[in-house]
Image: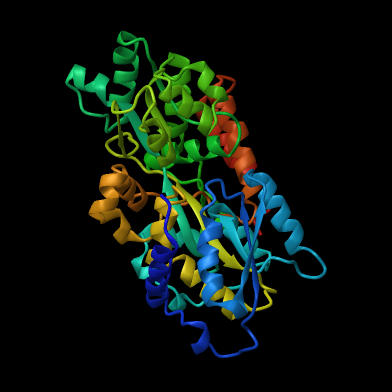
Amino acid sequence: MRWTRAASRCLLALGLALTGCVAPDAEHDGESRGPLTLATAGDLTGYLGSVLEGWNRTHPRERVTLVELPDSADETHAQMVTDLREADRGRFDVLNIDVTWTAEFADAGWIRPLDPGRFSLKAFLRPVVDTATYDGRLYAVPYVTNAGLLLYRKDVLDKEGLPPPRTWAELERDAKTIAPKYGLEGYAGQFLPYEGLTVNAAEAVYSAGGTILGDEGDRVTVNSAPAREGIGFLARGVREGWIPKPALSYKEEESKQAFQDGRLLFLRNWSYAYAVASAPGSPVAGKIGAVRLPGPDGPGTSVLGGSDLAVNTHARHPDSASRLIAYLTSETVQRQVLTRGALPPVRAALYEDPDLVKRFPYLPTLRSSVLFAAPRPKSPRYDQVSLVVQAVVRDAMTGHETSEAAVERLARELAAIPHR
């Protein structure tokens, strides 16, 4: 969607009213106000530059320079960490960080605690705020969110007179019996050993009622019957064939493409996959639906995705940084996050806006998924935690280890990570 300059000015004016920002002539000088840099992973849709132009027009003394880092989360993380460790204390003032990095950055002292009263946190979807906290303090403000969805071939299930599955048993049954009737594979997620496998594994454990870590990473809680059930669900799918072996090499895009090409009955993916697969020209456009992920006895638990906005501990102008974050999380800008950036916003009201729901019909389902979602395991050593989960779950899914042995090994290896 392209906005005219006049429309942008109107939207900006409303955003300033909502966030409490004031026009330049009403600003007062202060030591903590001045120009900023905002570091983020690559802006693939190009919307963020125009959003910041609106800020810069009305805040000439607090102009923001956008620094786009690589698209890869790992590379972005590496560059941010390198910058934050620099002797001159870094060149980035505001950081758009993955929700899994908050604990690490806060524990290292790289980002500063924030005053919750400066932000409209009560207007956000409730679970997303937890991704921005550590040790009971707010260290960032949610900017975009996400939750896994189960995409399904509605046309196929309609022919069979069946609703989408709500439980693992229903998913297994349909993947085993209905998918082959239509020349389809059963179910796929993101099962290559990378962050996507950690997410899929955590969702399986959470959906069964288990956890992986507790007490901000100080306690390992994964050695449990629910964890064995969750890992066993994934391993059984590969062993019995209703999760096709090619899915063991899928990331988000490969799995989305398999579903979009008409090769899968069911797919776990983020909301973008539904939007792309529903677009004109897609082979399955008009034939798909989306529901919450299933669990053992009913709808399961998704993992929260998205990113949070944090302030460098050594930011030159922390007051301006907080004001910018309030602007970027205002309802007006959050609307643009969805309509122009194609990213799920954190503001709850947008998920019930009739015009937006008409344009993005998956919003009510996504809202429900987010409201029942949970963060990934919190730990200052999250990168190590994720690598352990990937390796162990991979061995379970490829049949090199039973789910029981895998969970015991997972508990041992997680306990060996120094979490503080």
Q: Report the front residue among 112 and 70.
A: 70
Q: How many marks?
A: 0
Q: Quadrant of the C terminus?
A: bottom right
Position of residue 311 relative to residue 410, above or below, is: below
The image quadrant that residue 406 belongs to is: top right
Q: Report the front residue among 14 and 41.
A: 14
In x, y percent, where is residue 176? Answer: 34, 15
Judge from the rendering whether residue 402 lies leftward or rightward of residue 176; answer left or right: right
Judge from the rendering whether residue 366 lies leftward or rightward of residue 140; answer left or right: left
In x, y percent, where is residue 295? Answer: 33, 36
Q: Residue at x 57, y 24 (%)?
A: 249
Q: Residue at x 29, y 19 (%)?
A: 174
Position of residue 349 relative to residue 224, above or below, is: below
Q: Is residue 384 visible?
A: no
Colouring used for the render:
rainbow
The image quadrant that residue 18 belongs to is: bottom left
Position of residue 47 relative to residue 253, above or below, is: below
Q: Is residue 187 visible?
A: yes
In x, y percent, where is residue 191? Answer: 53, 29
Position of residue 73 relative to residue 402, above or below, is: below
Q: Residue at x 47, y 52 (%)?
A: 375
Judge from the rendering whether residue 79 lies leftward or rightward of residue 87; answer left or right: left
Q: Report the front residue among 357 and 136.
A: 357
Judge from the rendering whether residue 144 lies leftward or rightward of residue 80; answer left or right: left
In x, y percent, where is residue 252? Answer: 51, 33
Q: Residue furthest left?
A: 161
Q: Residue at x 61, y 45 (%)?
A: 385
